[in-house]
Amino acid sequence: MKAKELQMIVVDVQGAVQKPGVYRVKDKAIIQEVIQTAGGLATNADLKQINQAKRVADQMQIYIPVKGEKTVAPAGTNSSGGSQDKKIVNINTATVDDFKDVTGIGPKKAEKVIAYREEHGQFKTLHDLTNVSGIGEKSLAKLKDQLTV
């Protein structure tokens, strides 16, 4: 048996679960398994906003929203900062189509971000985007308000 088969990772589960906290789970586990490890869902959990089949990554935080809670401000919502009609895009889950809403990332750059993510794994911080060809510190400064990890 290889040592890698038993590798464990650490994830932080918060929100509408029975026992929020930090858990050790098998590498390659999916969110559904992590939810079960955290005692299952709370009765007011909103699973429509969660992809339970997504694989988890080491040091990842998983947040389960409650019904009626908005985890990402939808397009066209007014905030106290004026009229903000851009949605925030998660660079760890975004598709090329999702990046079309990000000013400064076209289809080619979106493909580079996705290719980098597939080759190197999940981004830990937004600053990791500077490892992608064509995205430097100046580009990141312009993009950071539109992106999340």
Image (spheres, rainbow, N blue to C red):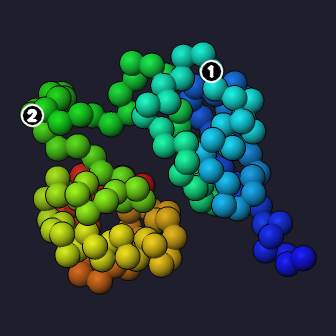
In the rendered structure, which amino acid carries the disc numbered 2? Ser
Q: Is residue 32 left or right of residue 104?
A: right
- Tell me whether the residue at label 1 lies in contact with that at label 2, contact meaning CB atoms closer than 8 angstroms: no
Q: Earlier in the sequence, mark 1 or mark 2?
A: 1
Screen quadrant of the C terminus: bottom left
The quadrant where residue 41 appears:
top right
Using the rendered view, name the quadrant where residue 29 is placed.
bottom right
Relative to the observer, which residue lies in front, 96 or 21?
Answer: 96
Total numbered labels placed on residues in the image: 2
Residue at the extreme left: 83
Residue 49 seen anywhere in this rendered image of the structure: yes
Residue visible at 67% across and 32% down in the picture: 20
Q: Which of marks 1 and 2 is in front?
A: 1
Name the foreground residue: 35 vs 1. 1
Where residue 17 sits: x, y (%)? 64, 27
> In the image, is residue 38 above or below residue 90?
above
Question: How far apart are labels 1 and 2 at the CA level?
Answer: 34 Å
Q: Please tell me the numbered disc located at residue 42.
A: 1
Residue flagged by tag 1: what amino acid is it?
A: Ala
Please identify the quarter of the rendering in which residue 4 is found.
Answer: bottom right
Q: Name the residue under label 2.
A: 83
Q: Residues within 10 Å of mark 1 (few under 14, many from 20)?
A: some
Q: Where is residue 68 in the image (x, y as percent from the top left)?
A: 39, 18
Q: Is residue 87 above or below residue 45?
A: below
Q: In this view, does 7 lie to the left or right of 16?
A: right
**Residue under the image location 72 percent in, 36 percent down:** 36
Numbered disc 2: secondary structure: strand
| Residue 137 seen anywhere in this rendered image of the structure | no
Q: Residue at x 36, y 53 (%)?
A: 90
- Report the residue at 33% width, 37% height from top: 72
